[in-house]
Amino acid sequence: MGPARILVIDDSTTDIYLLEIALNEQGEEYELEILSDGEAALQFVREHRSGVRKREPCVILLDLYLPDHNGLAVLHAIKEAPELTHINVVVLTGSASPRDRAEVQGLGARFWQKPRELSEFNDLAQEILAICRDALATSA
């Protein structure tokens, strides 16, 4: 089955660092790919659509507030790419806006507020790896 492949699209090095610590504490094998801005994320989508990139993540963690293009633009691009629509997308954001939540959920993604403490990152890591286990089991 192989390790879980997780794509993180976020420009916060602190959040990424805390997520990595939490994932490591779970004792499961995983691969982490990090993109730090909206342009890199849109390039990821273009590469999948053109067939250049074959390996796909089991889950995409996407921040709403990115440099270059916002997370909603990236989410729209992901959901419009037939090659990516089956991938679980979790919008992980500091926003508490009901409007943001409604738009994200309307596009078929999960909406989670960013953790503030390491214990919350551990909970997030457990949920992410559970999503990946489910996705990997379904594709096997």
Image: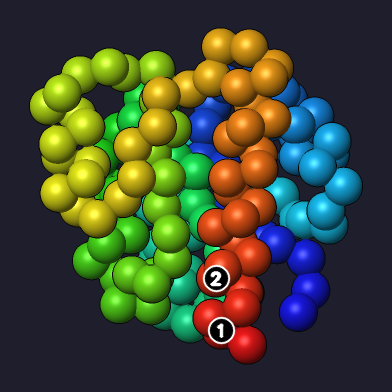
* Percent of width and height locating residue 126: 66, 43
Which of the 4 image quadrants contains residue 133? bottom right
Alpha carbon distance from label 2 to label 1? 6 Å
Circle 2 crowding by C-alpha within 10 Å: few under 14, some 14–19, many from 20: some
* Percent of width and height locating residue 85: 33, 70
The quadrant the C terminus occupies is: bottom right
Task: Name the disc covering residue 135, or none.
Answer: 2
Q: Please tell me whether mark 2 sits on a helix, a strand or a loop.
A: helix
In this picture, is 128 found above or below 3? above
Task: Give the amino acid type for the residue marked by disc 2 in the picture.
Answer: Ala
The residue closer to the viewer here, 65 or 46, is 65
Query: Farthest residue toward the bottom?
Result: 140
Task: Report the residue at 30% width, 77% height from top.
Answer: 82
Task: Report the residue at 15% width, 49% height from top.
Answer: 106
* Percent of width and height locating residue 60: 49, 52
Which of the 4 image quadrants contains residue 56? bottom right
Contact, mark 2 vs mark 1 (Cβ under 8 Å):
yes
Task: Give the amino acid type for the residue marked by disc 1 in the picture.
Answer: Ser
